[in-house]
Amino acid sequence: MINTGEILQTLRMIDREKLDVRTITMGISLFNCVSDDEKRLCDKVYDRITKQAEHLVKTGQDIEREFGVPIVNKRISVTPVSLITGALSSPIGVAKALDRAAKEVGVDFIGGYTALVPKGMTAADRRLIGSLPEALCETDLLCSSVNVASTRAGIDMDAVKLCGEKIRELAEKTKDTDGFGCAKLVVFANAVEDNPFMAGAFWGPGEGDCAVSVGVSGPGVVKTALESVKGQPFDVVAETIKRTAFRVTRVGQLVAQEASRRLNVPFGIVDLSLAPTPAVGDSVAHILEEMGLEKCGAHGTTAALALLNDAVKKGGVMASSHVGGLSGAFIPVSEDIGMINAAACGALSLNKLEAMTCVCSVGLDMIAIPGDTPASTISAIIADEAAIGMINNKTTAVRVIPAPGKGVGDTVEFGGLFGRAPIIPVSPFSSEEFIARGGRIPAPLHSLRN
């Protein structure tokens, strides 16, 4: 039974500490839509999504109103598009069909314009990656991802090279919005199949026909909890975060199960990821600073983030039998007011962010870099992150935004949850010859575990 104290505590977390359900995401398999006729495939994709997700948004709104829990986004993830478009000469038609379907059902984003290429690219994969600039410019709600590496397979450096080129091209095609198109594209290593968060969400081939998952976020709740243990040992800090993560996850479990019941689809997972926003009081960086750092990026930041990520997972896994996705702490620079301020004052550099990705949920996320950054440098940044993911058997990702016409000292403004970001310098030294080698970086020895 839930007692009065727990109810009041949850209400306080929602009202004062910015606890929210960041997303309800419906995962939809599109394998039954496959056709070698482009129009028929596009029609089947549109019909499948609009029928399956017809009541998703209304259900989310009803639960939000009845339970008093803010639900920020309603989203859809689908089967990686390259897996269903092998018979087509171009996947662009499917990209537009996905966008139309998302608009019809009223969701905020749809993800799954995706290629999974850790060990090599099929012709369909190459076509999809090659189409990314056009697809993301000619759609509004579509999000895309490419998985270029895994611990089992190594790193496909040909795919890494191609992704760097397409990110640079996409930035130029959206220069009127400071390269914002790149905010809808993530390059992964060890991508998970049930991630409900954009831009990297896709419904993996190992998933069922349909399920509903939630992503819960509560950086403000964790920071407030830590304020009560100021100066105490890290054992106490870890226990405090674990207890807080448990309560937050229970809210997500409640919403997910209710959405599952009302939509008559299976409950997928709860992703407990501390996903920040640009709003004051909703920052992962401020949690790290509450542990005693003068500024996020100071020495000790990686250790503090490691503690936070681990404690969040331990608390969350006790609250739900289906914790999944990425679950931990995100560090998207433009979406976190503490990260924005730390980057602006020079406390947070690209090198420090790379170190932090060894222990966070994902990786280099929503980072603005100079618009004249060569494609080979972007590819090399991706390769470094992929190597961290491959060796450490964890998910890593890169979502960088080369801001056309802007350099270090400038700021880009994206608005809403995407926030704003100071331009962070990259190394001035070339990686051109390194990236030009192509081929595949072999998997590490521990990939042979069986």
Image (cartoon, rainbow, N blue to C red):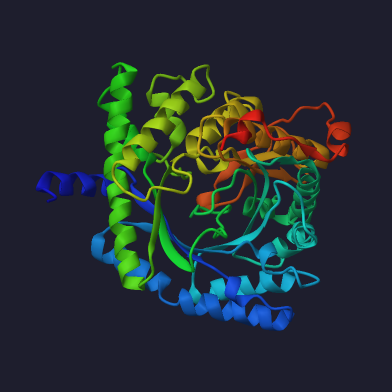
Q: Quadrant of the C terminus?
A: top right
Of residue 109 and residue 196, the one placed in the foreground of this image is: 196
Vertical side of 155 occupied by 142: above or below = below
Is 415 or 382 nearer to us in this picture?
382
Q: Is residue 423 visible?
A: no
For the point 17% across and 49% down, which residue is it?
Answer: 7
Q: Is residue 125 above or below residue 229?
A: below
* Above or below: residue 134 compared with residue 272: below
Question: Where residue 371 sits in the image (x, y, percent)?
Answer: 77, 42
Residue 195 pos. (x, y %): 50, 52
Question: Which of the 4 quarters of the picture holds residue 258?
Answer: bottom left
Q: Position of residue 207 (x, y in %)?
A: 50, 60
- In the image, what residue occupies the spot 85% across and 29% down? 430
The quadrant holding residue 64 is bottom left
Q: Quadrant of residue 234?
A: top left
Would residue 433 appear left or right of 324 to someone viewing this image?
right
**Would residue 427 be found to the left or right of residue 279 on screen?**
right
Q: Is residue 399 visible?
A: yes
